[in-house]
Image: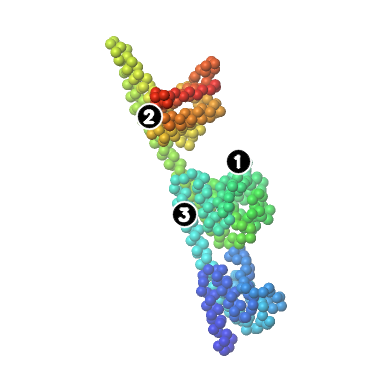
Amino acid sequence: MTGEDPLPPLLEAVLSVGTDLELRTTLQHIVDAAAELTGARYSALGTADPGQDGLIEISAPGSAVPEETVLTVPIRVQDEEFGTLHLAGKDTFTAEDEQLLHVLAAQAGIAIGNARLYEAARQRERWIEGAAAVTTALLSDGPAADALTTVAERARILADASAGVILQPTDEGGMEIVTASTYDDPGDIVGTTIAPGSPVLEQLLGGEPVFVDDSATDPRMTTHVRHRFGPSMMLPLQADGRLIGTLALPRRRGDRPYTSVERLLAVQFASQAALALVLADAQHSRELLAVFEDRDRIARDLHDLVVQRLFATGMMLESTQRRPGAEDVQETLTRAVDELQSTIQEVRTTIFALQQPPADAPTTFRGRVLRETAGAAALLGFTPSTRFTGPVEHRVPEQTAAQLLTALRRALATASRRTGVSRIEVTVDATATLPDGREGVRLTVYDDGRTGDGGTGTTVTWQAPL
């Protein structure tokens, strides 16, 4: 190169390719500078490994490439072949054009290396921040299903994926999608299963990551939703040797492939998320244990202090009834004894409820009755008293129990609408005898509210054979 003409454009081109640290923008600067330096009407840069940077081709506007007028120059980043710069649309490319492009290509390799480092640092920062946010979210109070959804949604955003999907092993030996975060309705995705024997299943159950170039055409993919996705990562959620599930991050068909950096960062994110899930589960177990211990302590206190004192008081009243001269207060004493016995029964019922784990209480018949009365307390401002007679857990079949609960719910709702209600008594008697002589269960709901005729007190009865 001699003279002053080539230097200013070349210097300007060299400077322009290093003005931006974003990789795609840097490549566009290279392509534009190559066309401007040589006077070519068409310029394009093709990458040797699309999976490295997620880029296939960068081009400048121009006509199609005539084969006889193409000039190509390789671009290397350190010792690695990055891609090739193609130029066309000029009658003749001179040796000076080729020399200029070699100089530009050398500077481009440096600029691309810097842009790669910057992009990798930015991605690493985003994934680290995302993993920290997931850990914080999971260690806050929330259901297990919400925790899985949090992992799926955050991973989808970080990976720029079309969907974030969590799969968990099934009893049959396959895997099932249990939660999904997508731009569209995930309804037809959740519940999708990978049947036992699928080629990809052995790797997933073994805790190995699986990378797919095109989900729609890869023979290992067998689900009915695979046709809508392209590049995909399937990453094990594994911590302390425990496989919680698999995190799948598919992109749409035609989207750019995942780079090696994205794959590495996603694998690290999945490991961190799995650890956070395990820690969240352990924290939830500790919290439940603390609740159980507290409930057990309250139950013991009620039994040891309240019930025993009430029982002792009842014994004193019964003894007073038998004394000479107690006839004048016989009715009052009898009513007091009945009230104490009723109170003892209610306290014992409360003790039983406290001794049941909260998650299991609604599955027992007695627990479901108590749940209905506790729910009514929010409307009434007080909790209805509840009494059980007989082995209700063993004698009342499930179908009858469901009908009784419906009747109880309806009776409580009706009672809550009456004026002047200050007391509701619920009795479930599994030793009742029906009018036809058969054994049965009887539900009685009494409230002291005002009736339509100006009176007070309403009793609703429901019964069924056992």
Image quarter hosting the N terminus: bottom right
Vertical arrangement, residue 311 with respect to residue 15, above or below: above
The location of residue 195, given as percent across then percent down, is 65, 45
> Mark 1, mark 2: which one is toward the viewer?
2
Secondary structure under tag 3 reads helix
User: Label 2, label 3: how many angstroms apart (C-alpha)?
Assistant: 52 Å
Extreme residue in the top direction: 324
Q: Label 1, label 2: how many angstroms apart (C-alpha)?
A: 55 Å
Circles 1, 3 touching at the beta carbon (< 8 Å): no
Residue located farthest toward the left when viewing the structure as drawn: 325
Residue type (three-letter) at the residue carrying disc 1:
Asp
Q: Residue at x 29, y 13 (%)?
A: 328
Which residue occupies 44% across, 39% down? 288
Q: Is residue 428 above or below residue 240?
A: above
- Few, some or many C-alpha atoms within 10 Å of disc 1 (few <14, some 14-19, many ≥20)? few
Per the model, the C-alpha gap separating discs 1 and 3 is 32 Å
Amino acid type at mark 3: Ala
Q: Say what amino acid the circle numbered 2 marks.
A: Gly
Residue at the front extreme, as displayed: 453
Q: Which of label 2 and label 3 is nearer to you?
A: 2
| Quadrant of the snapshot with the C terminus | top right
Q: Which residue is mark 3?
A: 133
- Give the residue at mark 1: 171
Residue shown at 52% from the left, 64% from the top: 120
Q: List the residue tagged with mark 2.
A: 420
Q: Compared to 229, does 170 lie above or below?
A: above
Marked residue nearer the N-terminal end (1 or 2): 1
